[in-house]
Amino acid sequence: MKLMLTAAAFLLCSSHAGTALATYADQLIAYGGAGQGKVVFDGRTHAGAGLLCADCHPALFATRKQALITMADHTESKGCFSCHNGSKAFAECAKCHRK
């Protein structure tokens, strides 16, 4: 019986592990940002603009907190820069990178 309860608890926890890393529309999340200052993602701002999580996940980003954007990516239309290109949305460094 103890083994069955342990197994059930493990399955329950592992099936919901991804939700612990989720950023919801009312939260801020900060990424390292290398030497340029932390990059802050504001879910409220994006939700306020009418965006849903599914607009970017998983097509542009994996659904986990992982900053894999390089300086070279800033000039390509992928990830954040699919929208933050200066015409669809702002492309000003200081609006995302905060020291």
Image (spheres, rainbow, N blue to C red):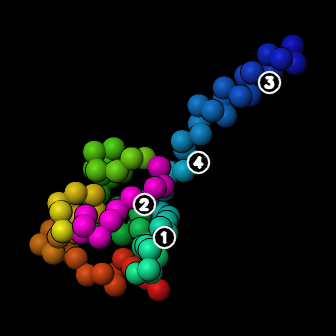
Q: Amino acid at mark 1?
A: Gly
Q: Which residue is mark 4?
A: 20
State which tag comes first along the sequence, 2 or 1. 1
Residue at image position (41%, 68%) is 41
Q: Which residue is mark 3?
A: 6
Mark 3 to mark 4 CA distance (whole Å): 20 Å
State which tag comes first along the sequence, 3 or 2. 3
Identify the disc placed on residue 3.
none
Q: Which residue is mark 2?
A: 67
Where disc 4 sits, the SS reads helix
Residue at image position (28%, 45%) is 59
Residue 72 magenta-drawn?
yes
Frontmost residue, 20 versus 24? 20
Give neighbour class at mark 2: few <14, some 14-19, many 20+ (Cα, 10 Å): few
**4 vs 2, front mark:** 2
Give neighbour class at mark 1: few <14, some 14-19, many 20+ (Cα, 10 Å): few
Spot occupied by residue 28 in the image (x, y as percentages of width and height):
49, 68
- Is the Cβ of the residue at disc 3 closer than 8 Å to that at disc 2? no
Mark 4 to mark 2 CA distance (whole Å): 17 Å
Where disc 3 sits, the SS reads helix
Residue at image position (22%, 76%) is 90
Residue at image position (47%, 86%) is 99
Mark 2 to mark 1 CA distance (whole Å): 7 Å
State which tag comes first along the sequence, 3 or 4. 3
- Is the Cβ of the residue at disc 3 closer than 8 Å to that at disc 4? no
State which tag comes first along the sequence, 1 or 4. 4
- Say whether residue 62 is visible: yes
State which tag comes first along the sequence, 3 or 1. 3
* Left or right for 10, reference 39: right
What range is drawn magenta here? Answer: 64-74
When asked about the image quadrant of residue 83, the answer is bottom left
**3 vs 2, front mark:** 2
